[in-house]
Amino acid sequence: MFKVSDFLNHFEKHNDFARASRFEVRIAPPTGIADLATLDLRFQCETTEFPSYSVNAIDNRYYGVPEPIAASPVAFGDITLNFICAGDMWEKKLFDRWMNGIIPINNYNPRYKDEYISSQIEICQFDGVATSESIATQTSQKTYSVILFSAFPISIGTLALNWAGDEIHRLPVTFRYDYWLPGNFNTALPASEQPKPSQNRPNGSTPPTGTGSRGQTPTTPPVTAPVIKPKPIKGGGGKFAGGGATGRW
């Protein structure tokens, strides 16, 4: 028989309910854009979501009815962060600068990926605030978090302007990333599986010393054998086109 008290006791054992409003986002600045070396958007991100994770499934059939099995590749969905804009619009200016640091408008040549990515974006979920008479002194504990590796913005949304309203601007920014892991999970990974900066180098960029034009160790190009075209076969007989005839008309 269902009892409301059993329902409440169950969640009480698991630290009440998880509240969507108790979160925080921390973005590590891109190392290759000097004027973005220090940025703090913790108080600006108003809404976001935990990222998705999809496993590709295919039908496998040995005999009889096919059964679904997991197969590569996995898919990580893009994530959108919505930022409250301050009066000086510094958030909009910041992301304008970040986007220009990815593909500069003076030549539209993409820069090196490891120059414009954020090494990690952490999204944290917190439990209920501690009981306190003063809101300013309330604290809470992190109960869950995810870390997005090698993230960078791919889209900045529009900001609507309207004389009939006086709403606060909210800037949507969509990020793409290599993959994500639950918080602290990556510390258990071996060094060979830790996230690494991209080695792909765009055309028109200057690679590091001792590397090729795309950030790879230069190698001797393979030797290609010359192409020999066969000579046309000519007839050895009479004057009639096509050769082969020995007599005359």
Image: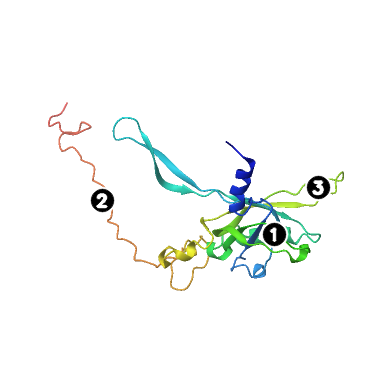
Q: Where is residue 122, by image quadrant?
A: bottom right
Percent position of residue 166, x then y: 85, 49
57 or 127, which lies in front? 127
Q: Amino acid at mark 3?
A: Leu
What amino acid does circle 2 point to?
A: Ile
Task: Report whether residue 116 is seen.
Answer: yes
> Which quarter of the figure has residue 5?
top right
Q: CA distance from mark 3 to mark 2?
A: 68 Å
Asked if residue 196 shows in the view, the reply is no
Kindly check if marks 3 and 2 are in contact, taking CB atoms under 8 A apart as contact. Answer: no
Q: Quadrant of the C terminus?
A: top left
Residue placed under numbered mark 3 in the picture:
161
Secondary structure of the residue carrying numbered label 2:
loop
Expressed as whole percent of the image width and height from the top left, the position of residue 158 reads 72, 48
**In the picture shown, does residue 189 fall above or below 84?**
below
| Residue that label 1 marks | 129
Dot 2 or dot 1, earlier in sequence: 1
Query: Dot 2 corresponds to which residue?
Result: 228
**Distance of label 2 from label 1 (alpha carbons):** 80 Å
